[in-house]
Image (tube, rainbow, N blue to C red):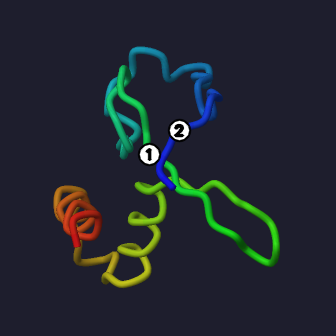
Amino acid sequence: MLGSRGGNRGDKIATGFLYAGLRSHVLLAACSAKGVAQEVVEEIQGRYVWRGVFTQALLKVLSEVDLNAVSYFGLMLLIHLCLDG
């Protein structure tokens, strides 16, 4: 079941990072600022749990690659392939 839920997880900007651009962080996002991320609901031990599709793909890829050998570009490519596959 695909869908989206309301909420603003991670919408606060830490002091000192506003307008810092990508000098200190790399942003990996499920969608653009105006987009809507996709989630799926799974039954786990009798409970229904919402999970982000992008986050599931990210965690799967991170568990399967050599983190010392993959670039952020490569990581995003692998995530894209995971989502399509």
Residue 77's place in the image compared with 36, above or below, is below
Element type at marker 2? loop
23 vs 55: above or below: above
Position in image of residue 18 (x %, y %): 48, 16
Real-space CA distance between mark 1 and mark 2, rounded to the nearest whole angstrom: 6 Å
Local packing at callout 2 (Cα closer than 10 Å; few below 14, some 14-19, many 20+) is: some
Task: Check whether the beta carbons of the residues at disc 1 and disc 2 lie within 8 A of each other.
Answer: yes
Q: Residue 16 location, x and y as percent?
A: 55, 20
Identify the residue position indicated by label 2 in the image.
4
**Amino acid on which the number 1 mark rests in the picture:** Gln
- Vertical arrangement, residue 71 with respect to residue 19, above or below: below
Q: Give the residue drawn at x 38%, y 44%.
A: 30
Residues 29 and 21: in front is: 29
Q: Residue at image x 23%, y 77%? A: 69
Q: Amino acid at mark 2?
A: Ser
Q: Position of residue 81 (x, y in %)?
A: 19, 68
